[in-house]
Amino acid sequence: MTFIEYVQTLSDNPYFGAGFGLFGLGAGAAVLRKGLQAGLILFRRHYMITLEVPCRDKSYEWLLKWITYKGAKKTQHLAVSTSFEQSDTGYVSTRYEFIPSIGTHFFRYNKNWIKVQRTREQQMHDVNLGMAFESVHLTAFGKDRNIYFQILEEARQMALAEHKGKTIMYVAMGHEWRQFGHPKKLRPLESVILDTGIGEKIVKDCKEFIENVAWYSDRGIPYRRGYLLHGPPGCGKSSFITALAGNLDRGICVLNLSDRLLSDDRLNHLLAIAPQQTIILLEDIDAVFVSREETKEVKAAYQGLNSVTLSGLLNALDGVASSEGRILFMTTNYLDRLDPALIRPGRVDYKEYIGWCSYIQLEQMFLRFYRMHDAETEKLSKKFAECILSYNRNVSPAQIQGFLLFFKNEPKTVVNNVSKIWELM
Ligand code: ADP
């Protein structure tokens, strides 16, 4: 039998014919599948545009909120983000916000359908943020990347509008600055009552600094300014700086130098990457010096943990990285513990004592507390101030505030009970 005759016999065989047909179908389907896959990849590559926003990016939270607001609010698959808000009076309220859950969502934006994929890596943890690594992928038709600029800008504007009239506080988490709680309602500067002219002088100095960029660049002087507020606790150092940040339309980044987990490197890094348009507040800087005097037991307990050293602090303050336009405030209760190297100009350009209550402060606190400006209350406020000062004892505004709270609506009674303030201390 020749080869041709052999093939002919095979093709006449119905079993072989069917098998060959099936093989053909399978091969065809595989080619089609591959073709479709390749086509899809080509289509995605040339006709779709994607954007990845990882959770460590600043836009991440804005974007999630914006997506929920824009369209994903219609989705039934939401995740909740709960936060607590503490008012100046200490009242804590709870706030729930919905954000798109992990998974896929769609929404329409400028006649374009956008696919949102929010993913969470179970294996990968962001050590800095202390949470699983997350990201959001946006996919849209077309090639115009402007769509993403617009989306990110809208998300930013929405966040800004929400923050208007509020002060954002940042705290350090690992090597990052993270927003702490919800933005707080601006604290009016007048609500922090300092001795005559002190607050006004500091505000004037800050404003002058902000408006005089050219003065610094012309002379090649680093454009930054350091302030040191010192004085006993409870006299309004931190409250004033927070109110000032709000007044200057800036956020505030707070770092406590007594934090045992704060190393020199971390401090340096955090100062270099502080968010723009913020005031940096380093609280209790004397903590750096106290550590020298600690007992052996305390030192042993903290062995292995880095705390900030004087040279680390000086390096961080002098650091060149991204410190343009930096306004840095430091506070301490013990000026005498500070090393002169720290207070020299360039590191501290403005030093101010925020002290115990003076006559004028007592009078103003009284008037502000009872919010009555009639002649009788004014007389009472003077009497109150005289009574307190007649004891010749130091008293802080925080103590006065606490005392007045015992007599919320009784300005007369409080004046007759001034002696009780010492019992409460
Ligand atoms: P410091 O930073 O000097 O230790 P804080 O700013 O933390 O003091 O003040 C503690 C509390 O006392 C805050 O609730 C603040 O409202 C109140 N307080 C302190 N000083 C003043 C002040 N000068 N005027 C109004 N309130 C004050």
Image (cartoon, helix red, strand yellow):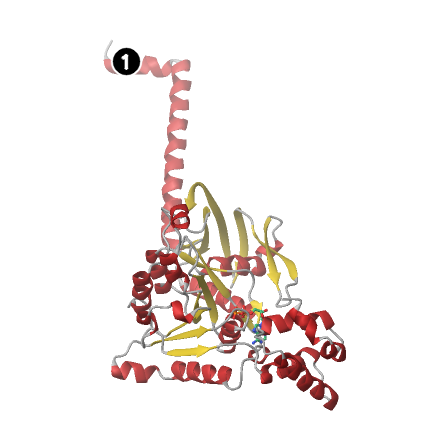
At a point 54% along the width and 80% down the height, the residue shown is: 194
| Three-letter amino acid code of the residue under disc 1 | Glu
At which x and y percent is residue 270?
38, 61
Q: Residue furthest front?
A: 391
**Which residue is more in the foreground, 224 or 129?**
224
At which x and y percent is residue 333?
46, 68
Quadrant of the rendered image containing residue 230: bottom left
Q: Quadrant of the N terminus?
A: top left
The answer to whether 230 appears left or right of 158 in the picture is: left
At which x and y percent is residue 267?
36, 60
Figure disc tally: 1
At a point 73% along the width and 72% down the height, the residue shown is: 407
Task: Provide the residue designation for mark 1.
Answer: 5
Q: Secondary structure at mark 1?
A: helix
Ligand 1 visible in quadrant: bottom right
The answer to whether 102 appears left or right of 300 in the picture is: right
Can residue 373 be seen here?
A: no
